[in-house]
């Protein structure tokens, strides 16, 4: 039998919200395979969180910059939240976002080599800030969207300054329609994305492995039913899953959209815009997602005890 470490139990608990002993039991059942343990907990109805997302644990800022029909979202991490409130750090992050959107460069390594306003490169500017502020900083990631004709909507949640905050979203709408109408719609969708955190634009864009995993969970949860009944249950369950994770199938968070899905809302706005509207894509960055902080001592002791190591 594989040894179940305290750190493994902790990781599973963070992913699922399930109890520590349930996490330990799940890991024991699947020989320490954490992804299989997530599914085991879900099948038993013990997982409180179906989404496979890491704990938001890093500090720093997410920046959004839009110039014309192009937009960029990027993340720069720091060691403490205190640095995120530092005006020099904020200027650094905003300037890097400006370089990224102006140059159209979002590969982190390539972006570090780009010229930084005032001299030197982006990488050198980060190094200088580290020396000045006295805290390690990392340009972690960046992404962009653009359209030939239309708008890029943006939204920053929990802003600490203009274009800087904890969650950044950009949304691309392609259309030759009325710009004010498109701009309002794009911002509303960006706000929705920040709140609802969709996994993909539509069901066809979902990772096939994610869909297959959901299909297997549904089959296992309903095992023992006749084949023709099971197939219907699984297909119905997948439709519900798509409504939860595919942007165009999600019900808009905005009351004025009267419960319509994002896809229906976009279609409805075509009349007001005076032209067809295509929702091209979205990018959503949440600060520190997938990055863990060191475990707090009390929590570590609690997990170790549950895992039989304390």
Image (cartoon, rainbow, N blue to C red):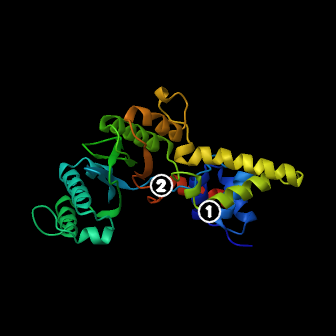
Q: Position of residue 43 (x, y in %)?
A: 74, 53
Residue at the spot 33% in from the left edge and 47% down from the top edge? 150
Residue to which mark 1 is pinned:
208
Q: Position of residue 29 (x, y in %)?
A: 75, 64
Whole-angstrom CA distance, mark 1 to mark 2, is: 36 Å
Observer able to see residue 309 = no
Foreground residue, 258 or 13? 258
**SS assignment at label 2:** loop
Q: To which quarter of the image does residue 208 belong?
A: bottom right
**In the picture provided, is 2 more to the left or to the right than 247?**
right
Within-10-Å neighbours for mark 1: few <14, some 14–19, many 20+: few
Which dot marks residue 296?
2
Total labels: the figure holds 2
As displayed, is residue 308 above or below residue 200? below
Residue at the spot 39% in from the left edge and 56% down from the top edge? 58
Q: Position of residue 307 (x, y in %)?
A: 66, 61
Observer able to see residue 164 = yes
Q: Quadrant of the C terminus?
A: bottom right
Residue at the spot 47% in from the left edge and 31% down from the top edge? 254
Q: Position of residue 195 (x, y in %)?
A: 47, 41
């Amino acid at each position: 039998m594989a040894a179940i470490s305290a750190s493994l139990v902790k990781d599973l608990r963070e992913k699922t919200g399930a109890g520590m002993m349930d996490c330990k039991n799940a890991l024991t059942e699947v020989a320490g395979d954490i992804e299989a343990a997530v599914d085991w907990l879900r099948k038993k109805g013990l997982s409180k969180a179906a989404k496979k997302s890491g704990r938001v644990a890093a500090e720093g800022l997410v920046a959004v910059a839009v110039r014309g029909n192009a937009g960029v979202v990027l993340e720069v991490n720091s060691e403490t939240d205190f640095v995120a409130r530092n005006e020099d750090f904020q200027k650094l992050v905003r300037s890097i976002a400006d370089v990224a959107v102006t140059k159209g460069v979002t590969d982190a390594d390539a972006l570090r080599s780009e010229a930084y306003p005032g001299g030197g490169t982006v990488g050198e500017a980060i190094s200088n800030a580290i020396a000045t502020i006295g805290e390690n900083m990392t340009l972690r990631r960046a992404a962009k969207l653009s359209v030939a004709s239309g708008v890029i909507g943006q939204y920053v949640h929990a802003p600490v300054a203009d274009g800087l905050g904890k969650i950044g979203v950009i949304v691309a709408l392609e259309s030759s329609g009325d710009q004010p109408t498109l701009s309002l719609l794009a911002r509303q969708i960006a706000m929705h994305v920040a709140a609802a955190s969709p996994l993909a634009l539509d069901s066809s864009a979902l990772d096939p492995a994610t869909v297959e995993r959901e299909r297997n969970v549904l089959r296992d949860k309903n095992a023992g039913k006749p084949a023709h009944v099971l197939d219907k249950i699984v297909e119905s369950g997948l439709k519900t899953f798509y409504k939860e994770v595919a942007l165009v199938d999600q019900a808009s968070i905005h009351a004025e959209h009267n419960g319509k899905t994002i896809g229906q809302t976009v279609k409805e706005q075509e009349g007001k815009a005076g032209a067809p509207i295509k929702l091209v894509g979205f990018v959503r960055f949440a600060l520190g997602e997938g990055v863990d902080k060191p475990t707090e001592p009390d929590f570590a002791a609690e997990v170790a005890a549950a895992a039989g190591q304390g």
